[in-house]
Image (tube, rainbow, N blue to C red):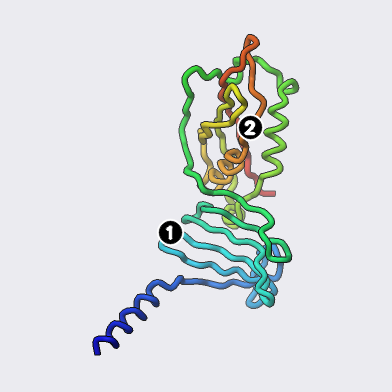
Amino acid sequence: MTRILILMLLFSNLVICQVDSEIKYFKDKYGQTEVESGPYMLEIKKINDSVTTHIFSKTKKGQKIWTQSYLGNQPYGIWYRYDKKGNIESTRDYNFTLKYGEFIPENAIKYSELRMSIQSDSNNEKIHQHIVKNFRYPEIAQEQGIQGKVTFQFTIDENGKVDNLRILEGADITLDTECFSIMNSLKELEPYKKDGQNVLVYKTMPITFKLQ
């Protein structure tokens, strides 16, 4: 009898620990047109009260196309995109904590004090190319019609290291997170000089998310 009770308790614990999941079907590989039954499927697994994992794959072959996790509506953890052979094609890192509010390190110089023209600053083009290359409009923001401008600040130290990323003016948690992800992956730029010496500089820029 005792053994039966232990087995029943173990089974009940397994049931409680099972991850809740929901499946949706789509007729396109972009997951935009939902249908009752289609060639693509999205499985949404509820890991706990806060975290869900989304797995998008082909219905028949079960071949994964991408996996994404969310903490509420905020992208979370490492996102993966797979090639046709099922190998990881690319990743996107959301393992960070959003930081808001201005932070100016001691001895940092405001970018405008350098009195550089946009045309003569090679870093502006590097930053622009980096944003264009890594820009992604969050799916949840698209579905909910969320738009806005996120203004952020960062520093470039004497060796060109990009650091102290902060959001000065947010728009929405999904857009703020995406902006942070884009700029968090920018690690190095050309160091700035003043009076012939490399200096620590802080700079402010915006990223605009606009639906067409």
Q: Specify the quadrant that holds the N terminus.
A: bottom left
Answer with mark 1 or mark 2, whichever residue precedes in sequence. 1
**Amino acid type of the residue that numbered disc 2 sits on in the rendered structure:** Glu
* Residue position marked by numbered label 2 in the rendering: 188
Tally of numbered discs: 2
Label 1, label 2: how many angstroms apart (C-alpha)? 34 Å
Q: Position of residue 146 (x, y in %)?
A: 58, 49
Task: Residue 117: name its quadrant.
Answer: top right
| Image position, residue 108 (x, y; %) | 52, 19
Circle 1 residues within 10 Å: few <14, some 14–19, many ≥20: few
Image coordinates for residue 17, horizontal then vertical, percent: 40, 71
| Quadrant hosting residue 85 | bottom right
Depth check: give the residue in front, 5 or 151: 5
Q: Seen from this angle, which residue lies furthest front?
A: 3
Place residue 124 in its image quadrant: top right
Question: The residue under label 1 is which amino acid type?
Answer: Ser
- Above or below: residue 32 compared with residue 167: below
Residue at 67% across, 44% down:
134
Query: Residue 111 location in percent, x, y?
Result: 60, 20
- Do labels 1 and 2 touch, CB within 8 Å? no
Name the outermost residue toward the right. Answer: 119
Q: Residue furthest top?
A: 195
- The residue that mark 1 highlights is 50
User: Which residue is rendered at x = 50% and y = 71% of the image?
Assistant: 21
Residue displayed at 63% across by 40% down: 208
- Mark 2 is surrounded, within 10 Å at the Cα level, by few (under 14), some (14 to 19) or many (20 or more) other residues, namely some
Q: Secondary structure at mark 1?
A: loop
- As drawn, the residue found furthest toward the left would be 2
Which circle, 1 or 2, is nearer the viewer?
2
Q: In the depicted view, which residue is nearer to us: 96 or 204?
A: 96
Q: Secondary structure at mark 2?
A: loop
Q: Which mark is residue 137?
A: none
